[in-house]
Image (cartoon, grey):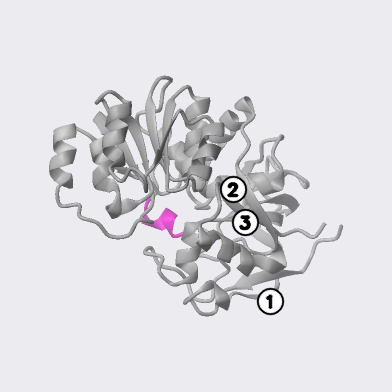
């Protein structure tokens, strides 16, 4: 096929709700020598996209942006200085395009797709070649689109400064994208997983994915005490903490001495964290903030996914022209795993 000159893309001209999303035609910029043109096949959504759409993303966002951070597609064209890639290669872009390795800083974080810079909810996207990773061969584009944020975040949490090891105990909160990936990575690495949810049906899915212990936190509001009971008072080595202030105190109750609480989200709203400094000191525990991860971590993660034949949990796929319905479904919290938008028409 010829190289396209225009693309259909979504824009958010007003950030007070995803009802403002509009689709329009735009000119594709000319490639710089270090860039590639990617045909976007699929985009996955996450909680961050809802915050961005409502203008509530705490790290800030540009005006009238193209939303979306997670994509999978194929290379259509390459700049003349690009090496190691070829037309037709199946790729994802790292969430933060300039985060190649090591720890991110403010300058790197400013290259996060779909907030400070335009994202990937478009038919064609120009990207820096250094941001790309290869898609594991056994994954579809829809499955691969779920990897850049949720999967890399979960991998970064569990394989960070003190990597997860076989026999560790892991607590995952809920059945959203990050928690489900953390469950899968933990089980694949030989850990024992405790999963929480407000839905018994969702917990059954977690059980099928390998969770050994299930806690419905509506039926057991003192779920931290139940975690201690299940672990004979020891607590867990790792907590995938997606609730934030509303759940962090209980997570610190549930973590073992010298354990890790990986602070990833803040979906539970406000809560009393006044006792947190004392809890942290007495538990000799670590609270670690996670901002996705580097391209190097993405590549390492994909090796694990390929070696174990892991498949992302895709709850539902929407066509590109029904993107607003995809946002509505994500906001309803009916999903387990990821909500995906199929972009390419052929």
Q: CA distance from mark 3 to mark 2?
A: 18 Å
| Residue 28 visible at all | no
Q: At which x and y percent is residue 219?
A: 36, 45
Q: Quadrant of the N terminus?
A: bottom right
Front: mark 1 or 2: 2
Secondary structure under tag 3 reads strand
Q: Identify the mark at residue 24; answer none if there is no mark.
A: 1
| Above or below: residue 51 compared with residue 178 | below
First along the sequence among labels 3 and 2: 3
* Disc 2 residue crowd, few under 14, some 14–19, many 20+, Cα 10 Å: many
Q: CA distance from mark 1 to mark 2?
A: 25 Å
Q: Quadrant of the C terminus?
A: bottom right
Residue 121 falls left or right of residue 51: right
Residue highlighted by disc 3: 127
First along the sequence among labels 3 and 1: 1
Q: Identify the mark at residue 146; answer none if there is no mark.
A: 2
Front: mark 3 or 2: 2
Which residue appears farthest toward the right when viewing the image? 1
Q: Name the residue at 43% across, 54% down.
A: 108
Residue 319 falls left or right of residue 267: right
Secondary structure under tag 2 reads loop
Q: Main structural element of the magenta stretch: helix, strand or loop? A: helix
Nearer to us in this view, 167 or 132: 167
């Amino acid at each position: 096929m010829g190289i396209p000159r225009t693309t259909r893309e979504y824009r958010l001209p007003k950030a007070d709700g995803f009802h403002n999303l509009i689709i329009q035609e735009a000119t594709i910029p000319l490639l710089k020598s270090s860039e590639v043109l990617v045909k976007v096949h699929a985009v996955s959504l996450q909680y961050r996209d809802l915050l961005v759409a409502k203008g509530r993303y705490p790290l800030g966002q540009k005006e009238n942006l193209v939303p979306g951070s997670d994509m999978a597609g194929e290379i259509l064209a390459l700049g003349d200085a690009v090496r190691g890639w070829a037309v037709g290669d199946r790729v994802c872009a790292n969430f933060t395009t300039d985060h190649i390795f090591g720890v991110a800083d403010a300058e790197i974080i400013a290259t996060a797709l779909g907030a400070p810079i335009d994202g990937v909810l478009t038919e064609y996207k120009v990207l820096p070649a250094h941001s790309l990773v290869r898609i594991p061969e056994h994954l579809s584009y829809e499955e691969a689109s779920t990897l850049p944020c949720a999967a890399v975040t979960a991998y970064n949490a569990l394989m960070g400064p003190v990597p997860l090891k076989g026999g560790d105990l892991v607590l995952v909160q809920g059945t959203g994208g990050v928690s489900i990936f953390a469950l899968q990575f933990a089980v694949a690495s030989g850990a024992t997983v405790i999963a929480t949810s407000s839905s018994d049906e969702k917990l059954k899915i977690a059980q099928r994915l390998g969770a050994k212990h299930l806690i419905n936190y509506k039926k057991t509001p003192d779920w931290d005490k139940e975690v201690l009971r299940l672990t004979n008072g020891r607590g867990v080595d790792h907590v995938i903490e997606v609730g934030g202030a509303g759940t962090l105190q209980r997570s610190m109750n549930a973590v073992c001495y010298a354990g890790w609480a990986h602070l990833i989200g803040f979906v539970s709203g406000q809560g009393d964290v006044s006792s947190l400094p004392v809890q942290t000191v007495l538990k000799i525990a670590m609270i670690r903030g996670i901002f996705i991860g580097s391209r190097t971590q993405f590549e390492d993660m994909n090796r694990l996914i390929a070696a174990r034949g892991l498949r992302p949990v895709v709850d539902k796929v929407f066509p590109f022209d029904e993107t607003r319905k995809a946002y509505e479904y994500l906001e309803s919290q009916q999903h387990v795993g990821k909500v995906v938008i199929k972009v390419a028409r052929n």
